[in-house]
Amino acid sequence: MNTQTIELDIDKRGCGNNCIRIAQGESGGTTIKALVYDNGAEFALAGYAAYLVARLPDRIHYYKGTATVSGNTVTHVCEESKLACVPGYTDEAYFEFIKGSQTVQTERFALDIMRDAREGNAPAQSWDNAVEALEKRAETAVSKGEKAVTDATAAVGNATAAVNICKSATEAANTATSKANAATRSANDATASAKAAKANADAATDAAKTATNAANASKDSADEAAADARKAAEEARGSISTDMKIYFKRVTDAQGNSWPVLVDMTV
């Protein structure tokens, strides 16, 4: 442990030449112990809360840390990560004691904060180490390049397979479309044929109805003619004597019209 002891007076009639040296990079490595006096007489610190206060070398930040007291001695274990965060020199450090509403400060003393040699710098390397590091970086770059080539090759293969799949899917879709179009045409043709067949059936039905009506009319005319013939025959039989011999003879005129004529053959 690095313990540095100084003497401080709360009278502050003079400016002491005390200087504490603290190194960056240490942790709990510096303890500041101060013997406190009041105009040369020991100052009893019992009942006081004690603090180390310092303005850092950047003149912007300050440090305040608790301290312990015993008799007229105050002790502070430095937090180098805070107190030594800024390297340089400052003469604005002091101990502060508080009891109730009373606050007492010692005379100022200096802090010399020594810079850590590693701060902001890269560690030194030999030429062999540098060459080895470059070789490792080159090997890493080559490995990454080879992996990139492998990945690219695999990606090309996947892309080619995907293109082939797309082509097959396109061909299947085109075939399905053609079949669907053919089926649509067949359905349309069947619909047209059905319509034509229905029209023909309707026409045949109408013709059959017409023929039936005509046949019925002819039958009625034939029935009437038969009735007339029977009536005429009966009348003729009533008017012809049993001694008469008659027959029908067909007579044809110059226009080619013919009709039957009753001829009396009685002797």
Image (cartoon, grey):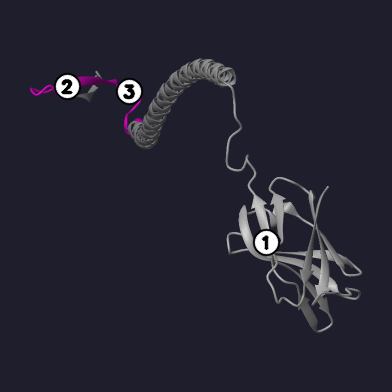
Q: Residue 63 in the image: x percent, y percent?
A: 70, 63
In the picture, the disc for residue 251 is 2
Q: Residues within 10 Å of mark 2 (few under 14, many from 20)?
A: few
Q: Residue 59 in the image: x percent, y percent?
A: 58, 64
Q: Residues within 10 Å of mark 3 (few under 14, many from 20)?
A: few
In the rendered image, the vertical position of residue 186 relative to residue 23, given as above or below: above
Q: Quadrant of residue 92?
A: bottom right
Name which residue lies at 49% across and 19% down.
Answer: 152
Which mark's residue is nearer the viewer, 2 or 1?
A: 1
Secondary structure type for disc 3? loop
In the picture, the disc for residue 110 is 1
Q: CA distance from mark 2 to mark 1?
A: 172 Å
Dot 3 corresponds to which residue?
A: 243
User: How many numbered tags mark residues here?
Assistant: 3
User: What span is colored magenta in the figure?
Assistant: 237-257
Secondary structure type for disc 2? strand
In the rendered image, the vertical position of residue 179 relative to residue 76, given as above or below: above
Name which residue lies at 33% across and 28% down.
Answer: 241
- Amino acid under disc 3: Asp
Q: Is residue 238 visible?
A: no
Q: CA distance from mark 3 to mark 1?
A: 188 Å
Q: Residue furthest bottom?
A: 101
Q: Is residue 249 left or right of residue 48?
A: left
Q: Residue 221 in the image: x percent, y percent?
A: 34, 36
Asked whether residue 255 is drawn in magenta, I would say yes
Asked if labels 1 and 3 touch by Cβ distance under 8 angstroms, the answer is no
Q: Quadrant of residue 204?
A: top left
